[in-house]
Amino acid sequence: MRNIAMQRLLLFMLSVVLASIGHTDGLAQTRAVPEGPAVVKKYPPYPDIWGVEGVVPSFCEAEDGEFYTMSSPSARPGESLDTWKAIAFFGKSTREIPSQIADSAWRSEDPLPHVGMLRCFGMFNHKDNRKYEHPSSLELPDGVTIRTACIGSDRFGRSCGYPYFGNGFDARDRNGRIVAQKTLVHIPRYPQHRYLPAPQISEDGGEIVERAIYLEPDLVPLMDGTFLVKTRRGVFRFDSQLHTRFQFKRQEVFLVETKLLDAVYERLFGPNGGPATVSDFQALQDAVVDLLSKLQKETKP
């Protein structure tokens, strides 16, 4: 009996040793699995690309430094519902992303890691990590700070919001002095009627024809001291003095000195603002369109 018990003990110990060897060998094999190839950064330096006009539902940054305008199948009438289209901002290439991956990312607030997208502006918003949120200011390498700013809010003392004001963006030096202020305005080809409820206005509410739309700017930093402004109607690149080489040729999006819009507000509402009627807001829309038409004529060769 003693010999049998001893044999069983030896067999048990041997099995434990063999199992531990197999487990260790498995770990070694796991560690030995090579990782995928490292992502090669395409940019910087960036090519001489300064903007793209058109509808931009979403705008995403990829692992290699490229940026993509993203559109869902529903935004492309007549095309397949099986893929999303991603068009490179700098490289001008096109990628097709399966709808199953994109839809899953949309539901889970995940910025498409399966296809190398690090963060997306406009469609995706990561609730646990602030790097996916839209910054309201950027500090550039030359000490200039870019900030989104409400048109006329400092002068009129009102919070930023339709129908009074829209958001522009400005550049401030190290001392906080504003060195440039710009606003992007969209003139729709087919103006829409918009109802303004009380108490936005001093009446019971009313309808205007929306002829000028202020484009909300999302700031996207680049690594060469320039930055991108993503809007619903295009993505545009600027330097620290708010200069761009992009040529606005469609006559739908206009880059305007904010001080010119401030002057329109002051002319219509006075230096301190005040109660406004539906007619006042329609006059504001018409005055902005007239201003842009005048500027366009002055800049034509």
Image (spheres, grey):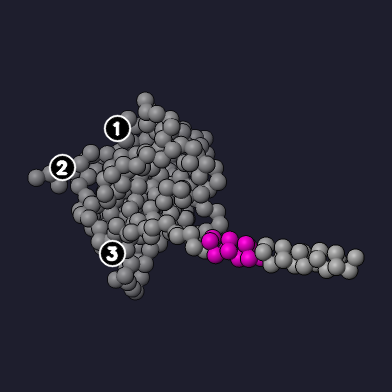
Q: Residues within 10 Å of mark 3 (few under 14, many from 20)?
A: few
Give the percent coordinates (x, y) of residue 180.
28, 61
**Element type where label 2 sits in the image:** helix
114 relative to 142, above or below: above
Q: Nearer the viewer, residue 125 or 24?
A: 24
Give the percent coordinates (x, y) of residue 84.
40, 37
- Do we see residue 294 in this rendering? no
Numbered disc in front, either 1 or 2: 1
**Element type where label 3 sits in the image:** loop
Quarter of the rendering containing residue 143: bottom left
Which residue is disc 2 drawn over? 297
| Residue at left offset 26%, top offset 49% | 91
Q: Residues within 10 Å of mark 2 (few under 14, many from 20)?
A: few
| Quadrant placement of the C terminus | top left
Which residue is disc 1 drawn over? 189
In this view, the residue farthest toward the right is 1
N-terminal-most mark, 2 or 3:
3
Which residue is disc 3 drawn over? 224
